[in-house]
Image (cartoon, rainbow, N blue to C red):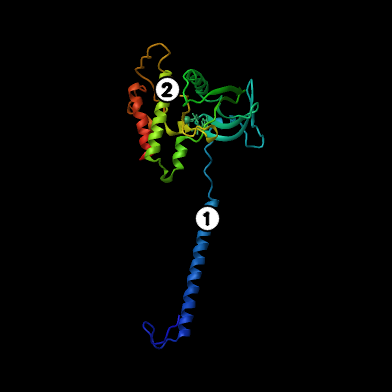
Amino acid sequence: MNVEPGSKGVPDNITTSKLAKKAAVVVEVKEKEKEKEKEKEKGADDREKLKPKAPSKQKPQDKDMPRWNQKEKEDRIQSVKEYYQITGELGQGSFGAVYAVTRRSDKQHLAMKVESVNVKKSMLAHEAEVLLSLSVVKSAHFVILYDKGSVENRFLFLVQTLVGINLWDLRTRMPEKRYTLAATLRIAEQTLAGLADMHRAGFLHRDIKPPNFAIGRAEDNTLHTVYILDFGLCRRIARKGSDLRMPRKECGFRGTTRYASLAAHDGAKALRSAVPQTPPTFLAFFFL
Ligand SMILES: Nc1ncnc2c1ncn2[C@@H]1O[C@H](COP(=O)(O)OP(=O)(O)OP(=O)(O)O)[C@@H](O)[C@H]1O
Ligand SMILES: [Mg+2]
């Protein structure tokens, strides 16, 4: 840029070389300031690294789980009839974990739900019974129970259909972290159809929440099907050909407070009349 002495904004007594020197000094000062800022940030990073890390939340039963990704390479689990190779972890629950496994005999990909034998109240045995009873109703929304077994003094396991991502995790991957109205309505149609099938089979789920539903897998052509998971809190309300069981007068809270019906919060049993409250609550939660 040519700056003529005496032009607008430039005093007559300052020559172009003086202006250039001044500009160079300003640039130098600014660069030094930038360097100082960088040093400060680096220091903050280092301090962050030096901070003692909060101990990871280890549950007592974690020690009983298969050590599939550690040195022991305990990644082959055997039932009476089969071998399963653990290939990854799909989810962690309050009492155990769920793994992706490959069945050795036919290389089929399945899911293995594992529960420590040291939990106060086992839910896995109950879950197996429910899955078996549900298999009578041929529903596209239920996973199939293929096998079960245990490793002495460590854990029990169930082997079931491998499905895709759960509805909670899927939502977090959506733009703006929510489903479109169209997707919400499709999810509503699928989840309600699944729950209706469960009620026809005589069961209440009692833990309806997004992580307990999952879509299928592209490999199985079931991407548009929503599956119901986690039957540990299910309660049988009717047997085939018999009347509904009478609701109990008193019973403790079951389920997840965030998604529970108002009646369940009020301390009443999971009233059948309260069941329709839950799906709209969690569907609204997806969309809003
Ligand atoms: N059959 C399956 N196929 C694929 N993923 C699964 C399967 N079953 C469970 N998962 C994954 O594992 C997660 C936990 O499963 P599930 O809810 O059955 O366990 P849980 O121990 O009862 O959990 P929580 O106590 O948190 O409800 C699910 O949210 C899902 O992401
Ligand atoms: Mg669950």
Q: Is residue 24 above or below residue 96?
A: below
Q: Is residue 254 visible?
A: no
Furthest-bottom residue in view?
13
Position in image of residue 152 (x %, y %): 62, 23
Position in image of residue 277 (x %, y %): 34, 28
Q: Secondary structure at mark 1?
A: helix
Kindly report the distance in space between the C-alpha atoms of the residues bearing marks 1 and 2.
54 Å
Q: Earlier in the sequence, mark 1 or mark 2?
A: 1
Residue at which label 1 appears: 45
In depth, the one of 4 and 34 nearer the eye is: 4
Position in image of residue 216 (x %, y %): 50, 32
Three-letter code, disc 1: Asp
Three-letter code, disc 2: Asp
Residue at which label 2 appears: 197
In depth, the one of 108 and 56 nearer the eye is: 108
Position in image of residue 197 (x %, y %): 42, 22
Q: Is residue 238 visible?
A: yes
The answer to the question of whether label 1 and label 2 lie on touching residues, with beta carbons closer than 8 A, is no
In depth, the one of 277 and 71 nearer the eye is: 277
Please tell me which residue is depicted at 53% across the width and 45% down the height of the picture.
53
